[in-house]
Amino acid sequence: MGAILITYIVTGPKEIELTADQREAIIAQANETKSRLVAEIIEESGEDNLKTAIEETGFNPELAPYLEDENGVAKALDELLQTWHSLPRDANARDLPGDDSRIIYVAGEMSWGDGPYGLAFTTLDNAAHLGLFPLLGME
């Protein structure tokens, strides 16, 4: 048995600048996704307590603080924008061939069976679960 590379490969705008109105609209839409996700986790587990429900379902525990906090989506959005522009150790980006206004962003690490714990991978994973990618023009 050997290690495997687990990654996110995302295309998106090279620079993401949001006005206050755009930011609030994105947060509102992502909060709807968050509400549906919380309802699904609770329904699947049969538990009323979200933390217990996440543990019961085996859902990504790294996402729990964002689901439990009423400002979780805003925090996830801010972390995504910071990570997108700063390229932490576990990420790299290149211009998208044929469109220099967009980048290919890759984040991940080797895994021996557990999930990657790197900053960029975790941030992208949380943002993906909260539905932020399409709201920011990411695929």
Image (cartoon, helix red, strand yellow):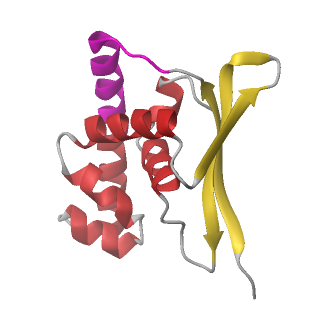
Is 132 drawn above or below residue 48 in the view shown?
A: above
Residue 28 rendering spot, x and y as whole percentages: 29, 25
The one nearer the camera, 83 or 139, is 83
| Camera-side residue of 118 and 43 | 118
Q: Is residue 102 in the magenta section?
A: no
Q: Is residue 46 visible?
A: no
User: Which residues are drawn in magenta?
Assistant: 16-33
Question: Up-down: is 77 above or below 9?
Answer: above
The residue drawn where x is 50% and y is 46% is 124
Instruction: Give above or below for 96 relative to 74.
Output: above
Q: Main secondary structure of the magenta part?
A: helix
Using the image, determine if residue 33 lies above or below residue 4: above
The residue that appears at 72% across and 72% down in the rendered structure is 4
Figure quadrant of residue 111:
bottom right
In the picture, the quarter occupied by the N terminus is: bottom right
Q: Quadrant of the C terminus?
A: top right
Quadrant assignment, res 29: top left
130 with respect to 106 (left or right): left
